Amino acid sequence: MARLSLNKTALHREQSRLRQFQQLLPSLDLKRRQLIAERRRARETLCDSEAELDALIVRVRDRLPMAGDGTLKIKNLARVSEVQLREHNLLGVHLPTLEKVEIDVAEYPALTTPHWLDRYQEALRDALALTVRLQVERERLRRLERAVKRVTQRVNLFDKVLIPRTRENIRRIRIHLADSERSAVVRAKLAKRKQIQGAHL
């Protein structure tokens, strides 16, 4: 850190910096609180989606137990063919938003496959769509967590480091200027006294 100049120019510069920091701090703190609220909403959305996927798995397990017995070897019933994402800017953070998920469903002859395959395929399609949505929501939450951390660090930097340091610098400069002023007055009085004593001799 550069050595602090103890003069009036430095005092004005430090006072200006303090005003700047004090103006920036409330807006940074507001941004932090808004990001925390958005992070909480993203967590709730993610928990809801995870619960929805868990419920779907339980429902498939209960209604279609024959799908898990391994007797029927069916592969590639459904696959994700296209995912469209859009990013939007929220308080300077680019967050992904799921626009569309396309899932291709394989065609099977109705006479040679079990009757429950259609319901299983539909459940698989829903599970794939939910899985993609979960991935996007996890990425959204990850970005929000990183943004909250970064903004919190900046708020703490201003609140706990820069503002107190600047106040301390202002205090030191004022003390030095007051001491200099006092010593100048004392020197002037001494010089005047010597001048008066010299005039009497």
Image (spheres, grey):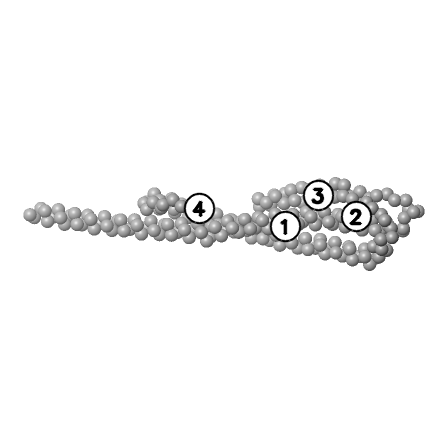
Residues packed near mark 1 inside 10 Å, few (<14), some (14 to 19) or many (20 plus): many
Q: State the residue at coordinates (42%, 48%).
A: 18
* Residue behind mark 2: 125
- Secondary element at image label 3: strand
The quadrant holding residue 80 is top right
Instruction: Measure how far apart labels 4 and 2 are at the Cα level.
Output: 55 Å
Q: Which mark is residue 20?
A: 4
Left/right placement of residue 150 relative to residue 139 reads: left
Looking at marks 4 and 2 on the same chain, the residue that comes earlier in the sequence is marked by: 4
Image side of residue 111 versus residue 139, left or right: right
| Residue 4, numbered label | none
What residue sits right under mark 1 in the picture? 141
Residues 90 and 179: in front is 179
Task: Compare marks 4 and 3 and give the one earlier in the sequence.
Answer: 4
Disc 3 marks a residue whose amino acid type is: Glu
Of badges 4 and 2, nearer the viewer stands 2
Q: Given the current orientation, which residue lies at the most extreme left position?
A: 201
Q: Is residue 94 above or below residue 56?
A: above
Mark 4 secondary-structure assignment:
helix
